Amino acid sequence: MSNQIDRLTIHTQAEEERFVCTWRLGRKQGIVYVTVDADVAEKDVVAELSALHYLVEEVQLMGDNRSGSSIEITISNPTILDLRSGRSKKSHLYPYAVLLLTKFLEVPLNVEKDCSWVGEGAKTRERHLSVSEPLKLFLDVKGHGKVGVRQHSFDQFRARLNHVSAVVAWKEMQRVAKAGMSPIRNPERGSTKLYHAESHWVFVVGDDGYFVTAYTDFNVGKHAQQAGDTPAIR
């Protein structure tokens, strides 16, 4: 029996000082009204990326901490395709595409301008979103707290796993994080090491709260101890 595919569609249009991002998932529809306060060009792209990120990560429209498996996404702005493939030279937009550049890297992505599917029912699920800075993707580490994940560190983690798929890499990160990790402060390097005793994974987290890199170490465990301070995402 094949797995059911969740097909999420988002269509964005400008409306005065905001963007109307209408979404569809199965028979459900809704609207996210996005205001982009960040000083950034191509706010329409930022709005659509932000609506997608918000629906997946905050609203959890497709479930809690969903990986990229059994999902298809249709968006209305073709620039997003170029960002996901790395072809775009618009570097200011990449920080807003973190979801599609990490755990959703291999999710089938289509572009469709048609919005004839939008119905009155969309107005029954309205939300408002204000975007003032690049988007953050979090990994919730038991024993430590939330850790931010960026494209570069996620790519490094995949490389440590012999370049496995993005879905497999995210599930492994999530497995280790949920199992619990012991923090070891490393103030001279401005970071914290998070150690998982069973697998010997070490996650290095910067003082800004972002995941830096990962490696396996069979000796670090003897130094592991619980610490009360958790770097905050800045």
Image (cartoon, helix red, strand yellow):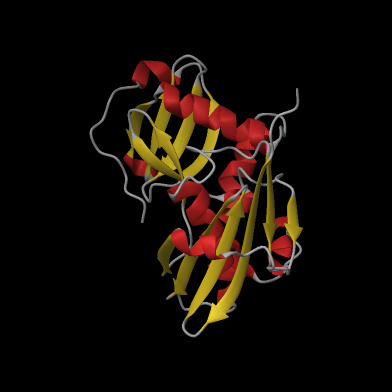
Q: Is residue 160 above or below residue 12?
A: above
Looking at the image, which residue sits at the far front? Answer: 120
Q: Residue at x 73, y 61 (%)?
A: 81
Q: Is residue 201 above or below residue 111?
A: above
Inspect this view and state whether residue 202 appears. Answer: yes
Q: Residue at x 46, y 17 (%)?
A: 219
Residue 224 point in image, percent of width and height: 35, 22
Closer to us: 189 or 53: 53
Q: Is residue 140 above or below residue 107?
A: above
Residue 74 point in image, percent of width and height: 69, 57
Closer to us: 106 or 224: 106
Looking at the image, which residue sits at the far left? Answer: 228
Residue 47 point in image, percent of width and height: 54, 69
Left or right of 2 on screen, residue 213: left
Residue 60 point in image, percent of width and height: 47, 45
Q: Quadrant of the N terminus?
A: top right
Q: Quadrant of the C terminus?
A: bottom left
Inspect this view and state whether residue 149 appears. Answer: no
Q: Residue at x 52, y 60 (%)?
A: 121
Q: How many marks?
A: 0
Which of the 4 image quarters holds residue 226? top left
Looking at the image, which residue sits at the far bottom? Answer: 16
Q: Residue at x 75, y 27 (%)?
A: 2
Left or right of 90 on screen, residue 201: left
